[in-house]
Image (spheres, rainbow, N blue to C red):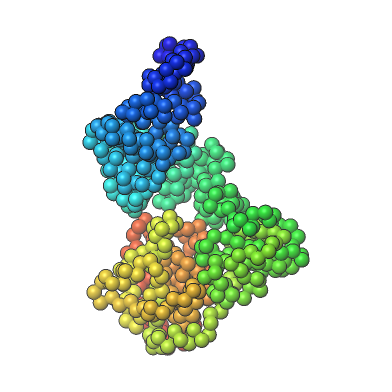
Amino acid sequence: MHHGGRLDEAELAYRAILQSHHHNFGAAYQLGLLSLQRGRVAESEGFFLLATQCNPESASSHHNRALVLRALSRHEEALASCKRAVELEPGNAAILFDHGRMLVDLLRDEEAIQSFDNSIAIDPSPARIHFARGNALLRLKRPGEALLSFDKAIAQRPGFPEAHNNRANALRELNRLEDALPGYRIAAQLRQNDPVTLHNFALALHDSGQFEQALKIYNRAVGLAPNFSEARKARATLRLLLGEFEKGFAEFEARLLLPEAAPPLALRPIRYWSGENLEGKSIAIYGDAAFGDLLQFSRFIPQLIERRARVILLVPRQFNKVVEAMQLGVSIRSDLDGTADYRCELMSLPFLFQARAETIPPQSRIAPDQPRIAKWKARLSPDRLNVGICWQGNPERNIDKGRSIALAEFEPLARIPGVRLFSLQKKHGLEQLEVLPDEMVVETFGPDFDEGPDSFVDTAAVMASLDLIVTSDTSVAHLAAAIGRPTWIALRYAPEWRWLLGRQDSPWYPTVRLFRQQQPGRWGAVFDDLARALSKETAEVRTCGKERDTI
């Protein structure tokens, strides 16, 4: 009856058996399968539990109960039940695979890989096992090994779009974007109506500098899923990069719908400001912890004050001192004490004030602490060009990929006579100071540099006396520009949107000069250009004397 599709009759029969023989394993097990077949997941778990009690040595009962528990998000219980199934049938490849999946559910990827390996040793044919193994390796930041697993998955199932996509992700993690693009393209061809797959392809095209094609694919993704906020945000950044400020800033508001954009709990009940009259009203301005964004977009706050608003600027505690030095005329807090009439994300202000490249407000200048300036100035050489350098951002942030630069790439600058290089690097990348090329000297300011609870106060003070800052695209670039120091920024081939395309200057910062990659991932030509420009400046200094405030 059951296998013939007569489910009602089968269920009545099984229940009748259980009513008279409560510990009948076959009836309990079949009712578990039948309940699952009919979508009664929670009920099926009870029947499989009864089956395991009737026959504790039945691996299939423990296995099926584990699968049901997993569907119910009872992950610890699911793993325990599947572990028992493995103990009973250690040679069952399917059970070992599911055991690995349940370890993944609990973020135990290392153990999951071992379980996948045990399954593969028995039966290496299922593509899904190699795919799951590759995903676990990617999460463990082992993209080279993940790549091999995805290759095996694709060899078993060439039309496996997720495997092509994630293989491309592994190549991207290995900084092999050019090699990754075909994988994203294949995945998009196999899943032409899947907006997530199209979005991944568009991101790769965007990062490789194929902007027109990327825009077309973003359009397709958003056309299929108009509420796909991540794709709309990505399309907005491309439009901003292309200088389409009106469309770009308008669509950039889609980021507010992303889970990571949720405001602090204290702010959620407060009405979001969308241009209402602010006279006599209070408004809380907040954002994420990106220091560069805070510096760049604080320039719009004076326009709130012009509207007679009482502005509360919420910033992480460690940035308070530097933000206070901007003298914005606002209340600077780490948490909202009380309430406000309105709230607004800092990065919504360009949209709300209709910013355009030609109407960007001037930067709110930072005035570093004078005693600190005097302290650090004493470490510099009055008769040489003192150049601060920064080469790496936070590698944990996806946005840093391709922006950071190996310190050794700065070596052409160190060879220029009359130039003294000083490290402005924080936390990440400091180990590179120990493995510099021969005769390359980069000096540091010692262990007490910016060691207190306030971030960047010493960096800001030393920048005030440096002749030049040369940096990758990090928060240090924004800080130097906000102080008004000459700042040269080395940019990747497809830069972040704020630096636009094809220009050496920036509408955001008048003291910035941009040096751009001409080929993805290649920094050599960039630093040759930087070295030529710096050599020219040192020659002028030798001729005219070191009296200029800017380079």
- For the residue pair 351 and 86, the one nearer the viewer reads as 86
Residue at the (51%, 49%) spot, across then down: 234
- For the residue pair 57 and 64, the one nearer the viewer reads as 57
User: Where is residue 241 drawn, in percent x and y?
Assistant: 51, 56
Residue at the (39%, 68%) spot, across then down: 427
For residue 457, above or below residue 62: below
- For the residue pair 286 and 546, the one nearer the viewer reads as 286
For residue 318, above or below residue 522: below
Residue at the (24%, 32%) spot, across then down: 91
Residue at the (38%, 66%) spot, across then down: 428
For residue 293, above or below residue 389: above
For residue 492, say whether it is visible.
no
Q: Quadrant of the N terminus?
A: top left
- Could you tell me how many numbered marks the image carries? 0
User: Where is residue 431 drawn, in percent x and y?
Assistant: 32, 69
User: Where is residue 313 drawn, in percent x and y?
Assistant: 62, 66
User: Where is residue 52 drawn, in percent x and y?
Assistant: 37, 28
- For the residue pair 416 and 542, the one nearer the viewer reads as 416
For residue 398, say whether it is visible.
yes
Q: Is residue 321 left or right of residue 463?
A: right
